[in-house]
Image (tube, helix red, strand yellow):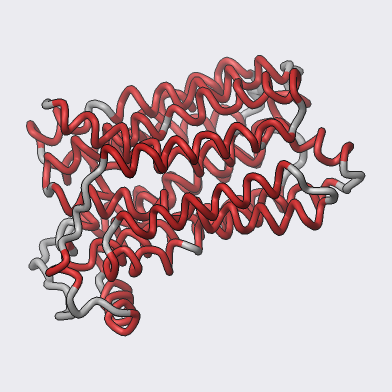
Amino acid sequence: MNAHFLRTAVLLGLMSAVGAFAVDMYLPALPSIGADLNAGTSAVQMSFLIFFLSMGFGQIVVGPLSDMFGRKPPLYVGLALFIIGGVGSAMAPNIEWLIAFRFLQGLGASAGMAIPRAVVRDMHTGNEAAKLMSLLMLVFSVSPILAPLSGSLIIETLGWRAVFWVLTGAAVIAIVLLATAQKETRPVEDRVGSSFGSALKGYWFLLNDRNFLGLTAIGGFGIASFFVYLASSSFILIDHYGLSPSLYSVFFSINAVAFIGMSQMTGLLADRFGLKRVVKVAVVGYATAMVVLLAVMASGVDRLDVMASLLFVGYGFLGLVIPTTSVLAMEEHGTIAGTASALMGTLHFAIGAVAMGIAGLFFDGTPLPMVAGITLAAVIAFALTQVTLGRNRQPVEAPAE
């Protein structure tokens, strides 16, 4: 692995992690924000949800823009919007202004979510792309480990507004690195003919590509299982099991460690067994661990060590699923990589948001509804894998621009 390969992975991972940190560092601040701004729980949660939605659906626009104007200009604009939103959030006088600036911040973060995957596809395909994607995920996945811990520390010592100043500083650093360390990977000649009209054709083409949709949905339901955990874990671990906020952050981070560790095996396993076989085996392991967890919890065993152990195993297998399905889904769509990455990211977030909403309807303060939601997502991912990768198909070509 050469230095350029590693440097690219670190830079792209940091671009993606800016938005992820704005989610994970924010979670410990929710009670403080409500108290300081005299806002109800639903209003404070809206400031989280609006960021989540704008970051997810903003990718629909920013992806085609990166096909039209190159990868770097939309990243600059996105980071600038993120900075404006961060400063505004830090200075928000009430919950309404906070929600507005979080929406803007989420739009800015969408560029960092969609474009790095397109850059990976610009530079590599096949197993090399899987290796780079797994390294990108390594940097990106540091967020669930460091963000809750650092967020709690910042809030306890400097207050919740300091979280946004830290995020703004990180975005400034990202702009500097983008300007000095990352080359443009979308040549001018490849942009000829790219327009919003061609983007709409590209979206229509992708929405009719069963292989792309299947692989995207496999990854989407994998991510959805983590989103369900994200939405309920603080209430369950703190209120139900009695953990302190700091210890909660440690337990929250353990699953990210499993995800990171296994994701780094992607390249090695892909070289030996092939990407499709890695996906098939990993999804089986992921779904099996989750089904066992549900069966144990449904039988009346309500133990934190049991739940944590099986989630650790399941999310370890999930660490192999996400990068491989992303690479396979975009493999045949290099000419519209930005558009394909945007649709993939948006569908991932849409599936995750729906899963969180449904799981929230059944939340009763115990772990069982959360575990049931996670298991359902895992079983759906397993079924989609059998349908998508269990049949022979001919490669397809993207529509001419």
Residue in the foreground of this view, choosing between 241 and 348:
348
Q: Assign the N terminus to one quadrant of the image.
A: top left
How many badges with numbers are in the image?
0
In the displayed structure image, the side of residue 84 where residue 132 appears, left or right: left
60 left or right of 82? left
Whole-percent x, y for residue 246 in the image:
68, 16
105 above or below 259?
A: below
Across and down, in percent, residue 267 comes to 16, 32
- Can you say which quadrant of the picture contains the C terminus? bottom left
Where residue 295 sits: x, y (%)? 53, 33
Residue at image location 35% in from the left, 58% down from the top? 73
Q: Is residue 267 left or right of 262 when viewed as pictured?
A: left
Front-lying residue, 206 or 361: 206
Residue at image coords 77%, 56%: 97
Q: Where does residue 142 sit, x and y in percent of width and height?
A: 44, 27
User: Is 276 in front, or is 42?
Assistant: 42
**Residue 362 visible, this angle:** yes
